[in-house]
Amino acid sequence: MFECDGGIPQSDSIPESLDIDKAIKNQPCEQELEVNLMAVRDVDVSKSISPEIEDSEDVTVGKQNIAPDLILNSVKSFKTNEKHPDNKTRGLSNRALKRQRRMQNSKERHRKNKVRTVEDRGYSTNIFSETEYYFENGLRKVYPYNFTFSTHAKERWYKKTILAVFTEEFVAGTPEFYRRHIEVGKVEVNGKRVTENYIIKNGDEISHTIHRHENPVVGGNIEIISDTDDLLVINKPASIPCHPCGKYRFNSIVFILGKELGYSNLRNIYRLDRLTSGVLILGKTVARTKQLEDHIVKRLVQKEYVCRVVGKFPDGLIKVDQPLACMRHNLTLWRVQEGGKESQTSFERLSYNGYTSVVRCLPHTGRTHQIRVHLQYLGHPIVNDPFYNSEAWGPNRGKGGIIENTEKEVADAILKEHNVGQWVEGKNPLYTKKLKEMKAKEGRKHTEESISDSQEKKSDDGTSEPVTESDTNKNLISDDGASITFTAVKESDTPTTSDTNKTLMDEGGEPPNKRVRLTNPEQLDFNEEKWNIDPDCEECKLKYLNPSPADLVLYLHAYKYKGPDWEYEASLPDWASEEWRDIK
């Protein structure tokens, strides 16, 4: 999250005189020359000359004494050569110049991405109006909408085909799905269409436009623990990710709070796993966010979790200090492994009901899935953990860090189990209905455009008369004989909660529902008119079964976070009570 800006490379290979022409003649190696020129280009004279020596004749760079005027002239010459790639006087081929530009552009993008810290504001209120929520069977759902993913190529993608990257990294779609989207131009690289055999290179920017269907999350209200001028603290429900990721965007904490409470500048100070519930602190101001981040980095925060694990957990305080390593990036799957990241957690049993134990967890480090993996290592995984209480690890389910299958076999088996949650009930009859409506609407639009071009129509007696509004609003008859009426309603015609909140914020006030204990949106039922389709979207064509809210909860809860001058505590979930029994 933090970056230390690099200065001038400490290299003995920088020519003393920085005479570009001379350097070219004396340097037979083009690659070495490129490094030298890049070093020259990276010099920012205005920043590299300190006040104490800016009047001096020489500036010391690494082990070289370089005259400032030579640096300026060399940088100017290099920039001139960059603007005119056909200029052969500088001795660089077009290929070398292009390679340099790609390297520099990649460095600049990387720098900007790294510098994006808490000083960036959050999501604007305009984004929150892209779609709406509806509630069904105790779940919060999102109407599908169009969205473009955009990312820069990661190093592990280099020299792979675009199709291979999508199928290996983004497991939500099938190879056929990605192949189709590449063919129709919904996948672009650097703003241009490519084939499925395009090879990813350093500096590539990849975009993918989809008809986005989000996974449902639990539909209850969100408890607000504290709401001050600089912090918002909530009891995060299980199943909702902290920020947009994968198949969750509007169904993420920052979007729900932004759309329902009007917050557009919330900053994540730390993250909880999607299935984990409990204390989540979000910053409203840069200063307070940085302060709490500093507390966490310096390990000044005491974190306390509770969970329910398999079997009777041992007596006393149990400490685990096993290192952790990631074994599958696209699943975020971790394991105990020598040479991994240092990780320490302490555990203590709070209760036992004859089958399972409620355990107090004190993580001393903050690794991904740390508590879950350490409990697996002890042989007492969380009861309903889909990753670390799975037979995919072998008969002992990874106890003692022992994996009885290969890492690939474990990951593939868990992925297969994980995808079982996307139960397909069959074809979606609403898609067929909507597709007919869309085709009829397109035909109607074509007819209206023809009428508009003539600006008149003939009456029965052959005279001309103006086209009236009632003529263009007549019902159409679909293929099955049903009468279809199309009513165009703009989102802007009906003010949303976000619109109201934005107006108040612009005027210096606060949204009326901002200082509340619980989010209290109107939980609207499904509205068929708001469900739009994309003929190329495979998800539109399928009907999915609703997951049970119980399937969206992990028995792991962030109970308490305590810093040097602050402390927040979340109410315990039902499953944490001593008398609780798992009913299935």
Image: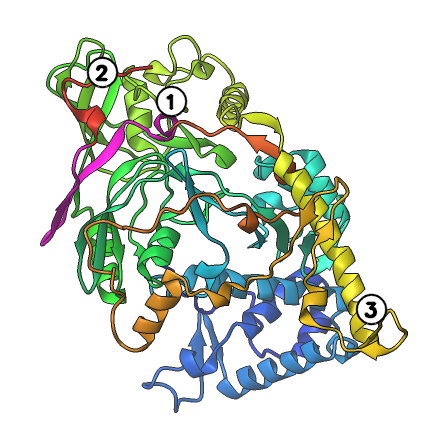
Which is more foreground, mark 3 or mark 1?
A: 3
Q: Does 37 appear above or below 289?
A: below
The image shows residue 312 at horizontal and vertical percentages of 19, 11
Question: Start and end of the magenta stretch?
Answer: 549-572
Disc 2 residue type (three-letter): Arg
> Badge 1 is on which residue?
388
Which is more foreground, mark 1 or mark 2?
A: 2
Out of 343 and 266, give the one closest to the viewer: 266
Looking at this rendering, what residue extends furthest in the front direction?
461
Q: Determine the residue positioned at 66% across, 47% down.
A: 534
User: Which image quadrant for residue 580?
Assistant: top left
Q: Residues within 10 Å of mark 2 (few under 14, many from 20)?
A: some
| Sooner in the amino-acid sequence: mark 3 or mark 1 | 1
Mark 3: secondary structure: helix
The image shows residue 79 at horizontal and vertical percentages of 63, 80
Tag shown at residue 581: 2
For the residues labelled 1 and 2, the Cα–Cα distance comes to 21 Å
Can residue 4 be seen in the rendering of this structure? no
Tag shown at residue 450: 3
Lateral position of residue 54 relative to residue 292, left or right:
right
Q: Determine the residue positioned at 76% across, 68% down.
A: 94
Can residue 85 be seen in the rendering of this structure? yes
Lateral position of residue 572 relative to residue 15, left or right:
left
Q: Does 486 appear above or below 173?
A: below
